[in-house]
């Protein structure tokens, strides 16, 4: 399986760090001279183990008992995930309108007194709040609170986790949507993949089990990595949780990016038929599965396709002090205003009880969405995405292994440089892990000759996508035989000297332009039938996108190749891939110069099919 090496590398790296003690003792045992740190995950007895009735204030009209409280510590975040917020960020609430630490603890104390036994700290990104460790320590003192969890993007986790564990943190959820460093940077618009992996490494080292990894699955972006994520659970105590993308654009539901739970499960069962379902815990949002013999497990958060409203036990307090009884609902009540207005504990409870009592059986818009939802789209092909930055022919995987060897701190591989008789590096990107086998992929120095074919192409008397009456029509390929189809297309982006130098030195403010363009080309190939109206959907078996810099022309030369077995060709996929990669490169550079020209978008070769092969020599 092409993508397996990625998961093997990450798995080997993480496993290498489970023994960090120099004496060789397991991490569950202290190193000589180290103080023993007790994990606060074991429930502490309280109130006669709920001998008293559950609070009426936290029980809604459908009998759901809300024992789980999520508290947002901040609206701020140090990432800009594409599915979460715009690149420039969002307007923030003035600091004076946010809950103070004392107000957070006052509300937490009140909810725990009424029966809440689990609190999760969220954001924004909770670990950028300066007093987060102190908040955890104060929460740990609340009698009756069994679990203190945190959901984090992992950027600051490795640095803060030892302190958080000592303070009383007992559960960790880490958000990670890809195992490919370049794709990570593309999704979150920031660097930091190695910091997230270091955080996972640290959590395993400190004995957290399971370490929950949240992955939002988006069609055309990371659904091809499902098997790589699952493979990590073979030797690591991870609970990889695949979350259905909540496709809410503006005020309209948009399903194009959503991959349903059943579709994901089908993909996993094709690889691991022995995948078995685990018993569901009461009020759990996750459907858990395990592969026999694997150390970890896999879960699905089916908030879109199979909601869990009927057993919901969650309440949320926003950073500015509003109580939300439903994630999908717009209804909020300000606990902050009542606190600052001098409300007594009894008055606060009446406000909370009234809000909980108004909670709906399930949110109306969610119900309408599920009634109107289209059938699940077929699984798209898996592509092997391994961005290579070549230096002395050292592969990306070997760089990762070297950097992680011995369980050390993972580092992002340095941008390798291939010197071609100049003081400036020549950068070369390939989406194929074995691109070294063809170093001449598309040399801009070679003369371009006119097109030639390996055999005479039969003349076509009419356009194939127009019927006899001149109306558009999709070609019927149902009777054509399945054959191996390969197509290669190319494009050139004339950048100009300024943008060229910035790309060559990887100094663009937006990030690595070559990596982003490469990812765009791969995604475009997969989505061609959605972009070009009369193209058939093709189950591609392979996509390769390569970019080379041509110093003589201050240009980027793009080559895209696609392969599939089927009744129709893949030249449109290759052309769409090359063109979109060129457009993405323009987008990355337009702030520097708009005097950029996209040129020479053309088919280089095509093999397979009834009309014979084509080669531009």
Image (spheres, helix red, strand yellow):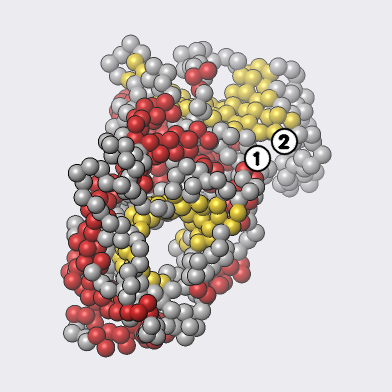
Query: In the picture provided, is 518 more to the left or to the right than 103?
Result: right
In contact (CB < 8 Å): disc 1 and disc 2:
yes
Q: Which residue corresponds to the image point at 54% horizontal and 30% vertical from the top-left?
A: 544
Which residue lies under the disc numbered 2?
Answer: 566
Q: Is residue 9 above or below residue 301?
A: above
Image location (x, y in percent) of residue 140: 25, 66
Give me the disc on residue 60. Answer: none
Picture disc at residue 539: 1
Q: Marks 1/2: CA distance?
A: 8 Å
Point 51% across, 12% down: residue? 447
Residue at position x 66%, y 33% from top? 564
- Around disc 2, counting alpha carbons within 10 Å, would you say few (fewer than 14), some (14 to 19), or many (20 or more)? some
Mark 1 element type: loop
Residue 267: where, in percent of width, then height? Answer: 61, 47
Q: On screen, 160 above or below 334?
A: above
Residues 610 and 542: in front is 542
Task: Kindly identify the residue that appears in the image at 40 percent across and 42 percent down.
Answer: 184
* Quadrant occupied by the C terminus: top right
Circle 2 SS class: strand
Label tally? 2
Instruction: Tell me if I can see residue 244 in this picture.
Output: no
């Amino acid at each position: 399986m092409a993508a397996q090496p990625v998961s093997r590398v990450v798995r080997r790296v993480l496993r290498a760090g489970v023994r960090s003690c120099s004496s060789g003792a397991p991490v569950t045992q202290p190193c000589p001279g180290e103080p023993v740190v007790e994990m606060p995950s074991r429930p502490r007895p309280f109130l006669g183990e709920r001998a008293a009735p559950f609070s009426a204030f936290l029980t809604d009209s459908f009998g759901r008992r809300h024992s789980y409280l999520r508290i947002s510590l901040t609206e701020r975040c140090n990432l800009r995930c594409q599915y979460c917020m715009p690149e420039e960020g969002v307007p923030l609430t003035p600091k004076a309108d946010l809950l103070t630490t004392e107000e957070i603890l006052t509300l937490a104390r009140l909810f725990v007194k009424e029966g809440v036994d689990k609190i999760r700290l969220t954001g924004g990104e909770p670990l950028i709040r300066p007093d987060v460790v102190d908040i955890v320590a104060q929460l740990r003192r609340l009698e009756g609170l069994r679990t203190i969890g945190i959901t984090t993007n992992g950027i600051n986790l490795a640095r803060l986790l030892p302190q958080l564990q000592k303070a009383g943190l007992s559960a960790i959820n880490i958000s990670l949507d890809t195992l490919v460093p370049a794709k990570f940077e593309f999704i979150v618009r920031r660097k930091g993949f190695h910091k997230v992996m270091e955080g996972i490494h640290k959590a395993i080292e400190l004995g957290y089990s399971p370490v929950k990894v949240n992955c939002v699955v988006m069609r055309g972006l990371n659904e091809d990595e499902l098997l790589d994520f699952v493979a990590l659970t073979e030797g690591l105590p991870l609970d990889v949780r695949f979350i259905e993308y909540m496709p809410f654009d503006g005020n309209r539901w948009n399903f194009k990016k959503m991959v349903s739970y059943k579709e994901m499960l089908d993909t996993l069962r094709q690889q691991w038929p022995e995948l078995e379902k685990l018993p569901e815990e009461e009020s759990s949002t996750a459907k858990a599965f395990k592969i026999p013999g694997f150390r970890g497990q896999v879960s699905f958060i089916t908030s879109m396709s199979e909601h869990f409203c009927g057993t919901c036990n969650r309440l949320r307090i926003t950073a500015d002090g509003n109580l939300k009884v439903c994630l999908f609902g717009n209804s909020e009540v300000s606990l902050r205003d009542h606190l600052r207005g001098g409300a007594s504990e009894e008055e606060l409870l009446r406000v909370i009880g009234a809000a909980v009592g108004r909670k709906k059986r399930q949110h109306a818009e969610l119900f309408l969405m599920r009634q109107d939802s289209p059938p699940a789209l077929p699984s798209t092909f898996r592509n092997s995405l391994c961005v290579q930055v070549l230096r002395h022919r050292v592969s990306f995987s070997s760089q990762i292994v070297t950097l992680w060897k011995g369980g050390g701190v993972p580092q992002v591989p340095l941008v390798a440089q291939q010197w071609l008789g100049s003081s400036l590096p020549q950068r070369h990107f390939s989406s194929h892990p074995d691109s070294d086998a063809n170093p001449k992929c598309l040399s801009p120095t070679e003369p371009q000759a006119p097109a030639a074919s390996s055999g005479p192409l039969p003349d076509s008397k009419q356009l194939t996508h127009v019927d006899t009456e001149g109306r558009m029509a999709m070609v019927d390929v149902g009777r054509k035989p399945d054959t191996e189809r390969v197509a290669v297309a190319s494009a050139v982006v004339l950048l100009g000297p300024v943008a060229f130098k910035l790309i060559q030195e990887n100094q663009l403010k937006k990030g690595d332009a070559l990596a982003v363009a490469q990812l765009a080309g791969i995604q475009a190939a997969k989505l061609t039938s959605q972009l070009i109206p009369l193209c058939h959907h093709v189950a591609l078996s392979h996509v390769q996108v390569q970019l080379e810099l041509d110093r003589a022309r201050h240009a980027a030369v793009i080559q895209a190749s696609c392969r599939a077995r089927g009744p129709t060709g893949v030249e449109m996929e290759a052309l769409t891939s090359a063109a979109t990669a060129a457009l993405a490169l323009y987008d990355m550079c337009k702030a520097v110069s708009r005097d950029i020209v996209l040129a020479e978008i053309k088919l280089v070769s095509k093999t397979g099919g009834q009309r014979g092969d084509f080669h531009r020599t």
